[in-house]
Amino acid sequence: MTTEKRELPTGFYKATFMIGLGFFTMGLMDPLYDNYVPVFLDGFVASRALIGALMTIDNIMALLLIPVVTAVSDNARTPIGRRMPFVQVLLPLSAITFALLPYAGTATLGVFVLAVVGFNLFKQSARGPVVALMPDTIPNEYRSEANGVINMMGGIAAVVGTVALAPLMDLRLTLPVIGDTSRRLPFLIAALLIILATLLLRLTVRERALPDRSADRVPVLRSLRSIFAQEDKSAVYILVALFLWFSAYWGMRPFMTLYVIEYLGLSEGIAGLSTGMVAIAYLLFAVPSGMLAHRIGRKRTIRISLIGMAVIGALMFSHQAWTLRIGASQGVAVGTFWGLLFLFGMFWGAANTNSFPMLWQMANLGTMGAYTGVYYVFSQAAAIVTPPITGLIVDAVGFRSIFAFAAVVMVVSFLVMGRVSGGETTSGSEA
């Protein structure tokens, strides 16, 4: 064991970087989906509450698919591993259906919703096995740093999606096969990059060999139930806390592009750069936040981040008052708002980088997929419950309310995290 700990730091960054190619694919799809599916829906329906409700389709499917598919992959044994078969089939199918979304967006609401359901069937099934590749490979004590690396890969993809690809939404060309590129080109380029990343993942990552012992396999429902049956309820408190901070995030996220278009006067393409600020900060601070947690503790790092996001939520709520309403130019208003989003991204990345390792610390190899799945149950449940609620609030009192909502919920999440006693590198299982 001592030899493994000494040798690992010299090579695990490279190994984790390659595993992060799976996260890269998710990072490409998620921001483009979150930014522009509401825009496509806005062409079909007028109610913000209905848009918020329709934006929960992906989260409902994540809630249903991720825990089950990931737990099933715990018990899979194939020549290329237990996660890789799921990854290699589902990610290319995700790419193909992702490329079709803007085409469906020019049809009818029914066709578009059907395309959204088909895309999420593949993407959400792939997500859990993609994420579980890392804890399968990296020992407990290095998972905060390793999760920082794969989150950095997701951040790189999000920057590519929001900063490089999103402005191409405004580009209008006529190309063979593709036709009119307006609103289509970012999705097509992203789909191609996803397929290339999936191929590289297959060529560079070898899963740890596990014995094919049927007696050691844990039934899916039993492995999920065991998480809540533990005497130490730290895992439950972490799950409740992350439900709350994801509720704060998803209260804002589906409406962010619409907000900056309507109140800051940005075009659809440039509006996508707003969430790009979060992605850039996530990219820059994912690895440092993992290192920070190794020094001061994961729990402390997360709680500092939650308070930071609460303060930023309050500043975004009052942003119009100290910019546009006192005569500031559009450039100043946009620049300061983007600055707040950048700071939010720093803290958001730190909270998410260290929450997964806290849960994985309490798992073993036989239940790693189950813990990964239940993480997504709570995070996606927040994404299902919250957008319709904040959509109703927006319809009633305006867009700024989403930021006040986020600030309050982040404070409650901070209080819940105070009850957590496990999940640090010196506690939990020896997976």
Image: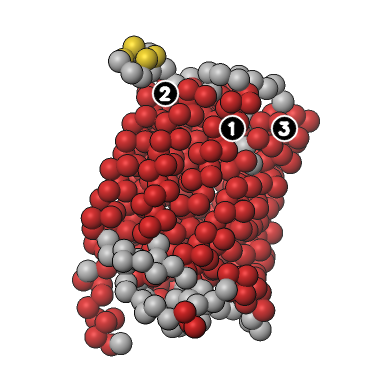
The number of discs equals 3
Frontmost residue, 362 versus 127: 127
Q: Position of residue 50 (x, y in %)?
A: 71, 31
279 left or right, relative to 203:
right
Q: Badge 3 is on which residue?
A: 49
At label 3, the amino acid type is Ala
Q: Are marks 1 and 3 in contact (CB under 8 Å)?
A: no
The label on residue 416 is: none
Q: Quadrant for residue 5, please give it.
A: bottom left
Q: Badge 2 is on which residue?
A: 184
Q: Position of residue 178 (x, y in %)?
A: 35, 19
Instruction: Give the CA separation, mark 1 to mark 3.
Output: 20 Å
At label 1, the amino acid type is Leu
At label 1, counting other C-alpha atoms closer than 10 Å, the crowd grade (few under 14, some 14-19, many 20 or more) is few
The label on residue 114 is: 1
Instruction: Give the CA separation, mark 1 to mark 2.
Output: 18 Å
Residue 298 shows up from this direction: no
Q: Position of residue 388 (x, y in %)?
A: 71, 39
Between circles 1 and 3, the one closer to the viewer is: 1
Q: Quadrant of the C terminus?
A: bottom left
At label 2, counting other C-alpha atoms closer than 10 Å, the crowd grade (few under 14, some 14-19, many 20 or more) is many
- Which type of secondary structure does the marked residue at label 2 adopt? loop
Which residue is at a point 35% across and 71% down the rendered structure image? 138
- Which type of secondary structure does the marked residue at label 1 adopt? helix
At label 3, counting other C-alpha atoms closer than 10 Å, the crowd grade (few under 14, some 14-19, many 20 or more) is many
> Residue most toward the bottom?
2
Frontmost residue, 271 versus 411: 271
Instruction: Give the CA separation, mark 2 to mark 3.
Output: 26 Å
Q: Earlier in the sequence, mark 1 or mark 2?
A: 1
Between circles 2 and 3, the one closer to the viewer is: 2
